[in-house]
Image (cartoon, rainbow, N blue to C red):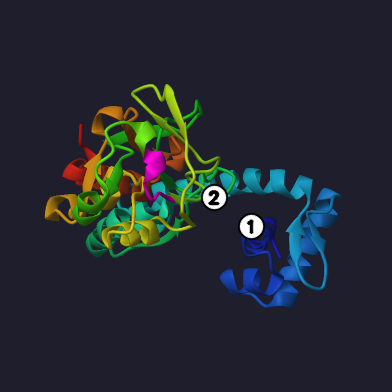
Amino acid sequence: MDRLQSLRIFVAVAEAENFAAGARAVGLSAPSATRGINALEAALGVRLFTRTTRQVRLTDVGQVYLQDVREVLAGLQAADEAATGAARTPVGQLRITCPQEFGRIYITPILTEFLDRHPGVSADVLMIDRIVNIVEEGFDIALRIGPLPSSGLAAIRVGQVRRVLCGAPGYFARRGCPQEPGELISHRLISVAPLDAGRQWRFGPGGEQMIKVEPRLSVSSMAAAIETVRRGWGICRPLSYQIAPDLEAGTLRTVLEDWEPEPLPIHLVHIEGRRAAPKVRALIDFAAERLRQTIGLNWK
């Protein structure tokens, strides 16, 4: 087995955390994958995995090596694409990560339209409400909501959203509308973990006013919180895009607009240079145009 094949097996096993699944991903048997990893470890003189009967985990050395190997394989793929003409045609698999609700509402329809236009492209989307390290975890593109930390990644701004307080008109008719943040203590509040961790909500353009809240209900799903609010039970604090159709239909309304924090920017983040393959550039351009046309992502 050649060294390049061993590297591909290594990445597949590391991502699957399983020899059999990793072997299937590269079209080999589990014993062949095991031999490939053993040969790679012997050549390097280090252990890349810790193995038990139940799981396979990367060692500390293996985690660092994985990132380097991904960069090597990506560089080889870019070279192959340039040589075969794929540098001008989007082909291959895209790995994308985005927040759950944003992915459901916006990314999925944009992506299916993009795939219809480019039959040579496939996509794997991780919808998760945490910041994913796209270099270490092998993703091509990430959609981020909020200020971006300094990094070597490229970022394209595609809109902004607000953190809002909302409730159903019927709820406010029964319980009254809060006129300032301090009045929220007399209302039924719904928090969403981990977004509302700490039970302290900030208000004002700079977040200068902080209110300690005692939610009557705490859930782990923003969709569940919004549905509960639609039924007139209480107030929750979503992002504006998550309730845009409800606001347009009048089934929900926002309150304390003058006390909202600064809007949060939305960016598409990706890796620059040779890693920005044609498939990545094509989707970035396509998605940026579609997202910028979406009214709910550009509210002032």
Residue at figure coordinates x 46%, y 53% from the top left: 216
Position of 118 with respect to 144 (left or right) is left
Q: Is residue 7 above or below residue 209?
A: below
Residue at figure coordinates x 52%, y 41% from the top left: 199
**Disc number at residue 11?**
1
What is the distance, in whole Å, between disc 2 and disc 1 at their CAs? 10 Å
Q: Amino acid at mark 1?
A: Val
| Residue 175 on image: x %, y % | 27, 49
Does residue 275 appear anywhere in the picture? yes
The residue under label 2 is 138
Q: Is residue 15 above or below residue 193?
A: below
Position of 59 with respect to 126 (left or right) is right
Mark 2 vs mark 1: in front: 2
Identify the residue at the far left of this view. 249
The quadrant the C terminus occupies is: top left
Does residue 144 appear anywhere in the picture? no
Q: Which residues are magenta?
A: 184-190
Helix, strand or loop at label 2? It is: loop
Number of callouts: 2
Q: Amino acid at mark 2?
A: Gly
Compare residues 150 and 276 and report the one nearer the observer: 150
The quadrant the N terminus occupies is: bottom right
